[in-house]
Image (cartoon, rainbow, N blue to C red):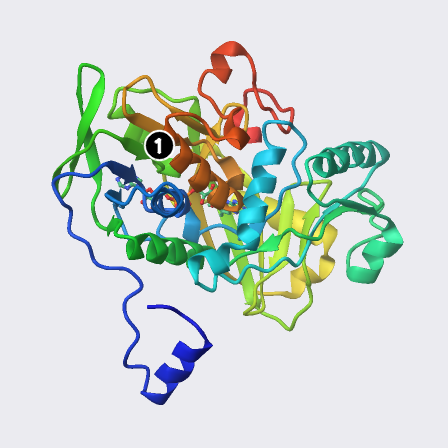
């Protein structure tokens, strides 16, 4: 069913009785050309690009819960391409370009809103670092602007400019960054992939891999065995648990990250702001809630909830930047399980098992990566070789010493 102004008008006239489910409730079939484990953003995007760009439609996406139950429906919805390092920046810029045409590509309103992202500067060395990052962005075709304190004041006059510990000295602005409605991304990709014949199978947990002579031949699931010669695993925070079933140990740890939302307020924040003197980021949703977050909780966990100590820490960061935040009532908070890699950058690669491919290690940043991750993973699954923008995201970088340590914080997943 094509969505358009005409379909809305038509349905309005006939009492909205003609809308169809966005995707079929598919039953598992015995055999597929490709099976993707994980119906999050990355798994569904992979299925979409596999079917649309590479013409491979005999595909199943297996999701243990419901679509949107993982991090794709839990994140703080920020998209951007403001990275520094060679391995990262071209990939995230590719992703931002895909976001810009996503709604037309999917025929689905994902509320892509390029409202701008501003990284605040609080010291001279930080300005130097941001100038360097901005230049790296521009060299890769991304937009970046360095703005001064007066320019920041014009956009966000209510920030705490005179804080003696963290004075605001300007910011690095990426106007093309912004927010996207996170669960609509899952629904849009699911609908588009389904329309080309991809089976999206919810409530179907992968419980084991069938591997003979180091070659994948199928999967054990809670809904029976499925044969396939190609499996792509994109299960984010469950990466370690799932890949262990194939006998593989990953350079990834699972950690909890929390998000917070206040009561609905009148429009006050036009874009996304990040605090440069602590870890805090904030935007305002279209419903009016201030949506914010900060650091991960700092200990390994598979629980989709966090603790009060981190909540206090995040709110302190917010209050230092934007004291009026203290007047807003916090309505909701939740957690998601992050696949934190050892150098803070992702992996899109084949594994040592023939026919088994892996996509993970997205840390905090996997939402903005969703389109490019799906595109590059589909390319790898279809052609057997990495997409040109994802050539650095290999497993062997950890043995070859070619880390992509964007933050320069070393092999400490809890710090990335
Ligand atoms: C609080 C929070 C805030 C965030 N904010 C941002 C942000 O602002 N910007 C940004 O870029 N990124 C952000 N992220 C990160 C981003 O959400 C993730 O990196 C990204 O969503 C992970 O990819 P995914 O969507 O495929 O994951 P998920 O949606 O988690 O998908 C993985 C799926 O695999 C399924 N699965 C697991 N095991 C199995 C199994 N055995 N069989 C079948 N299915 C299985 C899970 O149920 C899940 O649905 C945030 C994350 C959190 C938690």
Q: Is residue 28 left or right of residue 367?
A: left
Quarter of the picture holding the C terminus: top right
Q: Is residue 305 visible?
A: no
Q: Where is 47 relative to 300, above or below?
A: below
Q: Position of residue 375 (x, y in %)?
A: 44, 40
Q: Residue furthest bottom?
A: 13
At a point 45% along the width and 27% down the height, the residue shown is 386
390 left or right, relative to 270: left
326 relative to 105 in the view: left or right? right
Going by the image, does 368 lie left or right of 225? right
| 379 and 209: which is toward the camera | 379
Q: In front: 246, or 318?
A: 246
Residue 361 location (% of width, % of height): 46, 31
Q: Nearer the viewer, residue 342 or 346?
A: 346
Residue on which disc 1 sits? 381
Q: Residue furthest front?
A: 55
Which element type, helix, strand or loop, lies under badge 1? helix
Ligand 1: image quarter: top left
Mark 1 neighbour class, 10 Å CA radius: few under 14, some 14 to 19, many 20 or more: many
Q: Residue furthest top?
A: 400
Mark 1: C-beta under 8 Å from nearest atom of ligand 1: no
The residue positioned 55% from the left and 20% from the top of the image is 411
Count the numbered circles shown.
Answer: 1
| Residue 314 appears in the picture as rendered | yes
Which image quarter is the N terminus in?
bottom left
Residue 141, x across and y down, in percent: 69, 40
Q: Residue at x 55, y 59 (%)?
A: 112
Quadrant of the image occupied by residue 415? top right
Residue 329 falls in image quadrant: bottom right
Reply above or below: 352 against 355: above
Rendering coords of residue 192 (x, y %): 36, 56
């Amino acid at each position: 069913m094509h969505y358009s102004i005409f379909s809305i008008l038509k349905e309005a006239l006939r009492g909205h009785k003609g809308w169809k489910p966005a995707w079929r409730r598919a039953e598992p079939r015995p055999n597929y050309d490709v099976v993707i484990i994980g119906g999050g953003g990355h798994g569904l995007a992979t299925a979409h690009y596999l079917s649309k760009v590479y013409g491979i439609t005999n595909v199943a996406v297996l999701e243990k819960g419901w679509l949107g139950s993982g991090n794709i429906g839990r994140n703080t919805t920020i998209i951007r391409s403001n990275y520094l390092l060679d391995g990262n920046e071209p990939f995230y810029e590719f992703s931002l370009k895909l976001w810009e045409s996503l709604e037309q590509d999917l025929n689905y309103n994902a509320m892509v809103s390029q409202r701008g992202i501003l990284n605040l500067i609080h010291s001279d060395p930080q300005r130097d670092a941001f100038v360097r990052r901005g230049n790296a962005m521009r060299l890769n075709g991304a937009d970046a602007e360095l703005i001064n304190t007066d320019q920041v004041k014009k956009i966000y006059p209510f920030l705490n400019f005179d804080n003696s510990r963290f004075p605001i000295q300007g910011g690095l602005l990426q106007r093309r960054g912004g927010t996207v409605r996170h669960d609509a991304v899952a629904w849009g990709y699911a609908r588009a992939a389904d329309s080309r014949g991809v089976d999206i199978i919810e409530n179907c947990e992968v419980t084991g891999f069938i591997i003979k002579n180091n070659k994948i031949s199928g999967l054990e699931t809670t809904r029976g065995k499925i044969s396939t010669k190609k499996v792509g695993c994109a299960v984010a925070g469950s990466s370690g648990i799932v890949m262990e079933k194939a006998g593989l140990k990953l350079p990834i740890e699972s950690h909890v990250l929390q998000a917070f939302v206040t009561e609905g307020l009148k429009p006050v924040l036009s874009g996304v702001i990040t605090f440069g003197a602590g870890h805090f980021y904030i935007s305002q949703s279209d419903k009016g809630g201030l949506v914010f977050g900060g650091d991960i909780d700092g200990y390994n966990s598979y629980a989709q909830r966090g603790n009060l100590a981190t909540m206090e820490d995040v709110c302190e960061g917010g209050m230092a930047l934007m004291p009026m935040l203290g007047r807003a009532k916090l309505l909701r908070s939740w957690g998601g399980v992050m696949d934190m890699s050892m150098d803070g950058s992702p992996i899109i690669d084949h594994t040592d098992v023939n026919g088994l491919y892996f996509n993970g290690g997205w840390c905090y940043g996997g939402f903005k990566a969703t389109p490019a991750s799906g595109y590059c993973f589909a390319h790898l699954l279809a052609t057997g070789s990495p997409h040109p923008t994802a050539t650095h995201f290999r497993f062997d970088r950890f043995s070859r010493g070619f880390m992509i340590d964007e933050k320069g914080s070393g092999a400490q997943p809890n710090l990335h």
